[in-house]
Amino acid sequence: MAETEGEKQPIIIKKIKKGGGGHHGGAWKVAYADFVTAMMA
């Protein structure tokens, strides 16, 4: 965590929820699970 001249910058977490975005919103979970499974194999 780098501070510039003693200034603490707030951590901004943007949660973007678009109506009915279940297909695109969950795709990264499938890709991540596939990646983790490949690493364990």
Image (spheres, helix red, strand yellow):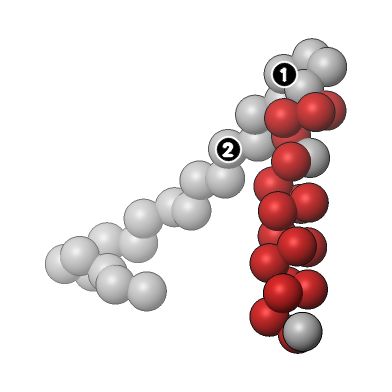
Question: In the displayed structure, would residue 27 be above or below residue 19?
Answer: below
Residue occupying the far left of the picture: 5
Q: Secondary structure at mark 2?
A: loop
In the image, 27 versus 16, the foreground residue is: 27
User: Residue 29: percent from the left, percent from the top?
Assistant: 76, 51
Question: In the displayed structure, would residue 23 be above or below residue 40?
Answer: above
User: Residue 10: percent from the left, percent from the top?
Assistant: 44, 52
Query: Marks 1 and 2: in contact by CB < 8 Å?
Result: no
Q: Where, by quadrant of the figure, is residue 39 drawn? A: bottom right
Mark 2 Cα shell of 10 Å, populated few (<14), some (14-19), many (≥20): few
What residue is at 65 percent from the left and 29 percent from the top?
16
Task: Identify the amino acid type marked 1.
Answer: Lys
Q: Which residue is mark 2?
A: 14
In the image, 34 versus 21, the foreground residue is: 34
Residue occupying the far bottom of the picture: 40
What residue is at 74 percent from the left and 34 percent from the top?
25
What residue is at 27 percent from the left and 61 percent from the top?
7
Q: How many marks?
A: 2
Horizontally, residue 2 falls left or right of residue 31, namely left
Q: Secondary structure at mark 1?
A: loop
Q: Which residue is mark 1?
A: 18
Q: Where, by quadrant of the figure, is residue 27 drawn? A: top right
Task: Identify the amino acid type marked 2.
Answer: Lys
Mark 1 Cα shell of 10 Å, populated few (<14), some (14-19), many (≥20): few
Q: Quadrant of the C terminus?
A: bottom right
Q: Nearer the viewer, mark 2 or mark 1?
A: 1
Horizontally, residue 34 falls left or right of residue 3, namely right
Find the distance from the CA under tag 2 to the CA under tag 1. Answer: 12 Å
